[in-house]
Structures are given as C-alpha cells and as structure tokens.
Amino acid sequence: MNYWFRANRPEFVYLVAGTVGGIMANSTRPAEFIYDNMMIHATVVHSAHLFGAKKLLYLGSSCIYPRNCPQPMPEEALLTGQLEPTNESYAIAKIAGIKLCQAYRTQYGSDFISAMPTNLYGPHDNFDLTSSHVLPAMIRKFHDAKTEGRKEVTIWGTGSPRREFLHVDDLADACVFLMQHYQDAMHINVGTGEEVAIAALADLVRLIVHPDATIVYDTTKPDGTPRKLLGVTRLHNQGWRHRTSLGEGIETTHEWFLAHHAEARGMAQGA
C-alpha cells in the first residue's frame, strides 16, 4: 500500500473497500471478516497519513451498533451494548476503523472522518446466494424461481425484522458531500431514515421480479438484529437527503441484473 501512495500521492481518499456479506457469510467466515477488514483499514489509513493525504473518508457499517440499540440508532449509541452475534467480527473490525481514524486525528491532526452507511444495494451488487446481502439475494431468488418455473420462493427467518436500504448512487453523492462539508471527529450515519419489514421487502421484490410467486419463510434460519434504522438527524442538519425511493431502486437494480445476468453470475462465482 505504501508503494501506491508514494507513487500517486492522492489528496482525497475514499476508504470504501471491505470484505462484506449477509448473515450466512458473516456466520461462516468470521476470521476473514475481521482480519481482512482490519488489515484494509490499518494499511490505507496509515499510508494516507504517511504520504500527506489532505482528507480521508472511511465508510463503516450500521452493524457497529448494539443489537438492542435504541431506534433510530444515534451515533452516540456506539459501544453502549452487546453486538449482534451473527455479524460480531465484521462489526468489531468496523468499530476499529472508526477508532483508528479518530486516533490519527488526535495524535497527528489528520482530517480523517468516518461515515456509517445503512444497507446498500444497486447495480454491480453481489447476487451470490451464499455471500450476498438480503436485497440482491432476494432479487436473485425470485429471478431464478421465475426462470426455472417455480412458484415458491424461500426467505430466511420470520420476515419480521425491519431494515433500511440506501441506493449506491445516493451513497456516492453523500460521500462527495461529506468530503466537501464534514470535518467532525464523530462518525456520522448515512441513510434514508425510512425502514421496511423483511416481509414487505420480499413482497415488493416479488411484485417487481416474479409476481406469480408465493413466499415461504424458513423460520429455522436466523433473523439477525430485530430492527436497524439509522438516526440521520445530524446528516439532514448538514443539508443532505437521499433521492432514490426503494421501489425505484429495486426496479433499476433488477433491470441491471437482467442486462448483465452473465456478468452478475460470474461475480457471484468469484466471490
């Protein structure tokens, strides 16, 4: 990493890389999730410091907050309770990234900031059923059922958990906005401030991808955190709000998937 920073000398660094996945990936690959992410954070942040980057924006995750966090989840809730067991390794790595940026601010005066996005989705997502997040996995499940002539689609858990989703185009816009306008040591949440039950999400995806399907819930599988809604008051007060509605975002993501189906499958196989 030092060689790249020495050769390119970036002024502004967007640290968005990471090993990510849904409940299955987090549960079966915890060592990868904590090691990969901590190494990415440590090497990039330190190199940005060594080679004089003017500003760095680090992206974490809403998984940093306690399982039983007050809703919506305010930034101040960090480290106030136990984490969700199904993604603890990932969450610990992301918390370490926040503290790393704050430590470099304290010791060296580095203008390193952190933002915590909610669940993301959109074009170029990972649609692999063993490692993807919930929304792209649903799109893939309903698509496969439609093309294979199956009516039933199985969704993990009870359908009762509530989640928040942000389109990647909105996140990109928020990142540029924060790089230009945000300078606080405190991390800042990036989301929509709107939530949807997994059951309602599944039905929305069904209507868009495979309207004739019937949804079956596998209650032997875990639900994960009961509710995850970010408090976005600080972000709204900064002057930024999302633009893409969930329905519109799912439609365009499905359209991208259909147009790049072979590519999406290849990405999944390489995940």
Image (tube, rainbow, N blue to C red):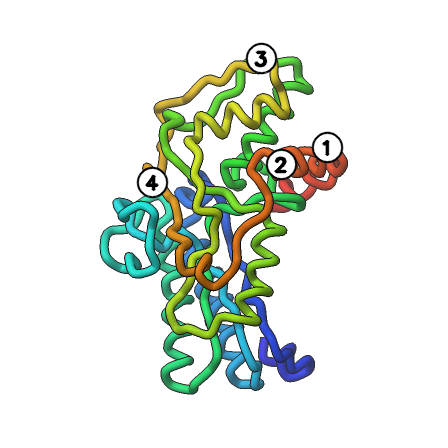
Q: Which residue is tagged 4?
A: 225
Q: Nearer the viewer, mark 2 or mark 3?
A: 2
Check disc 2 and give the amino acid type. Glu
**Spatial distance from mark 3 to mark 4, Cα to Cα?**
29 Å
Q: Which residue is tagged 1?
A: 258
Check disc 1 and give the amino acid type. Leu
Sooner in the amino-acid sequence: mark 4 or mark 2: 4
Sooner in the amino-acid sequence: mark 4 or mark 1: 4
Please tell me in which quadrant of the rendered image residue 51 appears. Answer: bottom right
**Relative to the observer, which residue lies in front, 30 or 60?**
60
Check disc 3 and give the amino acid type. Lys
- Pointer 2: residues within 10 angstroms few (<14), some, or many (20+)? few
Residue shown at the point (51%, 54%) measured from the top left: 19
- Pointer 4: residues within 10 angstroms few (<14), some, or many (20+)? some
Left or right, 70 with respect to 160, comes to left
Image quadrant where one finds the N terminus:
bottom right
Q: Element type at marker 4?
A: loop
**Spatial distance from mark 4 to mark 1, Cα to Cα?**
31 Å
Q: Is residue 120 above or below residue 79?
A: above
Residue 151 is tagged as: 3
Please tell me in which quadrant of the rendered image residue 232 appears. Answer: bottom left
Q: Nearer the viewer, mark 4 or mark 2?
A: 2
Q: Element type at marker 3?
A: loop
- Pointer 1: residues within 10 angstroms few (<14), some, or many (20+)? few
Sooner in the amino-acid sequence: mark 2 or mark 3: 3
